[in-house]
Image: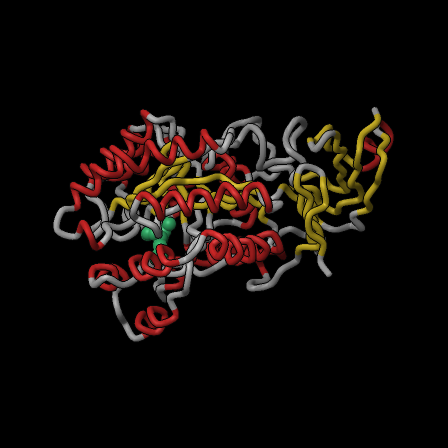
Amino acid sequence: MKTDLIIYNAAQLLTCASNRKPKKGAEMNDLSIIENGAAAILDGKIAAVGETKHILDHFSAKETFDAGGMVVTPGFVECHTHLVFAGDRLEEFELKIKGADYLEILKNGGGILSTVRRTRAASIEDLIETSAKRLDKLLAFGVTTCEIKTGYGLDTESELKMLEAIIELNESHPIELVPTFLPAHAVPPEFKENPDAYVALICREMLPSAAKLLADRGFTGKFYADVFCEKNAFDLIQSKQVLEAARSLGFGIKAHVDEFTNLGGARMAIALDADSIDHLDAISDEEIKMLASSDTIGVVTPTVNFNFGSCDFANARKFIDENCAVALSTDYNPGSAPCPSLPNTMAIACRYQKLLPAEAFNAATINAAFAVGRGSEIGSLEAGKAADILMFDTKDYREIIYEFGGNFIEQVWKSGTAVYEKV
Ligand code: NIG
Ligand code: FE
């Protein structure tokens, strides 16, 4: 068979094959590695993977690429970011070092709300320019698909400006984007005395306008709504109202739950068939069991705890041992996790949440793909899936996590096209 591209001679080719299902529990420790592996690519998709000899015997290609004994893996899927924002939170960084509390800072009008002031004042052009640079950093660490949330606008116009920026970036940047509408990220100052009125505005005006913008712009991919279900943000009833309204408008469902406080958000979001529930530091044993028997992915963000200087992490080891499907994310944002590196996030997860390197790889690829509703198309190297492929300058995938703070990426392909090469 004639194909477009064959990448061959990979010391290890991590397929992360899952047969179109998220990996749960013990399955997360299986990467389905092909030693001396190769991949044949046709029309941007994987035509076949196998041992180099087998692929070269059965396929020809317009272009062949010698992986030179390096490691080849699926592209990373970054399933939870707040990457579009203006300004920085350098002062808050110092305040937190001196002991200030994240939710107290928010209550006093800082934190997320300080980024809201800067983001409201920024032009869409500025947001696109600064965000494109951040996406370049993610690409250099191996991200080929990235979810991005709104949530620093908190009024209709500014939330739509953020959403529009995400739609524009999806068209102009090689990383494929999954937009998430998050007007329920914090209560804006105008509604401080009456948060229910803000929730009503979200349901009545903001969500329908966002759905309309996505349709008007011809956006055909998966899109989500999300809510920050937390003390000093949105309570359980308000969160449920927002997510139910979103679901009736065709949004997929995600929820920030149990980051600091258990308000019952995990149970509520699982019952609403959320594709992911994220953070999970304070999830209960009963809710872990509910997660295990659901199709929802549990996304953990150990960067946040690391950034807060805390050694108290979400118990991802227990989630896997209880048979949940776990995904990993940087949670890239200016406040709780200014970190663009998934490999470093995996390094933290292995050390503090006791994931094995194989589990971390599946968490950042195939399970993250399911967390953004794309598990049948991306996240693993299996025939028919997008040829989103990474090549790392090492012979053993574990080294990518064993060394922390580094970057082994040599080359990135998105849908079979080379989009990044180490210089
Ligand atoms: O996932 N928790 C709420 N949202 C983000 C933080 C955003 C920010 O601090 O700006 C999170 O941690
Ligand atoms: Fe978040």
* Corner quadrant of residue 293: top left
* One can see residue 56 in this view: yes
Please provide percent x and percent y for residue 16.
60, 37
Q: Residue furthest left?
A: 193
> Could you tell me which residue is drawn at 36 percent across and 37 percent down?
225
> Could you tell me which residue is drawn at 30 percent across and 50 percent down?
259
Quadrant where ligand 1 appears: bottom left
Q: Which quarter of the rendering shows the C terminus?
A: bottom right
Please provide percent x and percent y for residue 398.
61, 53
> Could you tell me which residue is drawn at 61 percent across and 43 percent down?
75
Please provide percent x and percent y for residue 203.
25, 34
Q: Nearer the viewer, residue 266 or 324?
A: 266
* One can see residue 267 in this view: no
Question: Is residue 160 placed above or below 211 in the rendered structure?
Answer: below
Please provide percent x and percent y for residue 152.
35, 52
> Could you tell me which residue is drawn at 31 percent across and 25 percent down?
248
Question: Is residue 137 placed above or below 3 in the rendered structure?
Answer: below
Q: Is residue 279 left or right of residue 74?
A: left
Marks counted in the figure total: 0
